[in-house]
Amino acid sequence: MEEVLPYVHPVIKMLEPYIRAEAGKHFGQEVEVLELGEIKSKEKFGATGSLLIVSIEFVTEFGPYLSSLAIKFVPSKASAMLELKNATLLENQFFAFPQFGIPKILLATTDNPVVLIYEGIEGINYDEIPRKQDLPKWAGKMLALIHGSEIRPVDDSLYRDLARILGKSLEHTGMEVQISNAMGRAYQNIQQSYSGCNAFSDFHQSNVMVTYANSTPIKMWVIDPEFMQVGSFDRMEDVGTFFGFQFLMEYIETGEFVRATLDLLKFLDGYNEILFQLTGRKLYEIYPNGIPVPFFIAMWALMDAIDLAVNRIGNNSYSHPEVVNRLNFAVALLNNQKFHEQLKSFTYSLAKKK
């Protein structure tokens, strides 16, 4: 705890007006007494820095008040400013949709260390919720809002170049030709689509949180907007990232992806609904030759396999069972005719849906 306090105490002092106002909302009247009590924290590590989740108890004249903050340490002033810009952009995207949100950045410092202080969110990570029910549809709506209303062609060269890199990296597996052929067939749908957008680029289920009240979901949040990119990325790239691990785990457990497919279709239904509100178009119109979800789920699995073999396990361990599982899964998904027919049928149903 001692190593945390030097960062937390100055932050609390700077944020006292905010904390006092939030306590006043909690108690329904102005708070005069606000004395610092117990501080608890836990640290999480991400790709570009660490995050302190801090829970702070205050003593007030009306009883204890619990506040939480997320203190994120970022590598540079430039990355902090970019994340601040992205968070502000998403706040604006969600403005007319109060069921969705991004935690507010309460304070940013550019000294050493560079930190962003977010409001703490009381919620559950999406990937930790066992029975998701209508949540996939919510998540689909939220991603459509993140992608926004501008419709433009995809820069398909992004994925052609990436496919070359994947093929080169998989030369030692004996599966590179099989994978390349399957990816090529799926790639054609991207070339003929009109679905370019800015990408969130880190839309994992662990970066989505849900707040509940009386066991009912009331708000969905997206966190960590640090990797958002401006460009003409395919809209389904973020969808592939969101569902990749879920599809993979079901495939490892059962050899199929029935439950994950049902969640995916709910997700696409929600996405289509918001896409139509924003643009007047539906998914079948921007994907005239089919939704390329299989390509992007497979791409996620293949990139994860390479990262496992090269970095997390190391020594180019392409024969490791976890790596082989991902390679086999990618091929199975790309070649699964039933899955492709389900997507085609679902896209047709969206075309008829009012």
Image (spheres, helix red, strand yellow):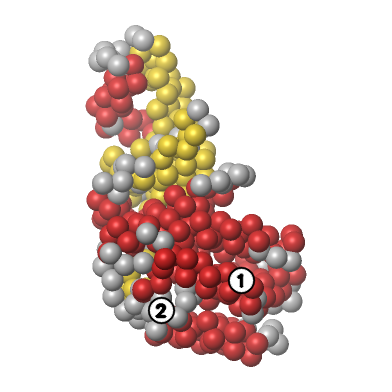
Please tell me in which quadrant of the rendered image residue 129 appears.
top right
Gap between marks 1 and 2 measured at Cα: 18 Å
Query: Is disc 1 surrounded by few (<14), some (14 to 19) or many (20+) residues within 10 Å?
Result: some
142 w.r.t. 131: above or below:
below
Q: Nearer the viewer, residue 209 or 195?
A: 195
- Circle 2: element type: loop
Residue beneath label 2, please? 288
- Residue in the image at 43% along x and 55% along y: 270
In the picture as drawn, the residue positioned furthest to the top comes out as: 61
**Marks 1 and 2 close (CB-CB < 8 Å):** no
Examine the rendering and report whether any part of residue 337 can be seen. Answer: yes
What percent of the width, then of the height, locates residue 135?
A: 50, 47
Left or right relative to 74: residue 346: right
Q: Nearer the viewer, residue 195 or 76?
A: 195
- Residue in the image at 30% along x and 22% along y: 25
Left or right relative to 264: residue 316: right
143 w.r.t. 61: above or below:
below
- Circle 1: element type: helix
Query: Is disc 2 surrounded by few (<14), some (14 to 19) or many (20+) residues within 10 Å?
Result: some
- Residue in the image at 51% along x and 56% along y: 266
Identify the image quadrant of the C terminus: bottom left
Q: Residue type at mark 2?
A: Pro
Q: Residue type at mark 1?
A: Phe
Residue beneath label 1, please? 339
What percent of the width, then of the height, locates residue 14?
A: 27, 32
Left or right relative to 82: residue 307: right
Please tell me in which quadrant of the rendered image residue 231 appears.
bottom left
What percent of the width, then of the height, locates residue 161?
A: 45, 85
- Residue in the image at 47% along x and 70% along y: 348
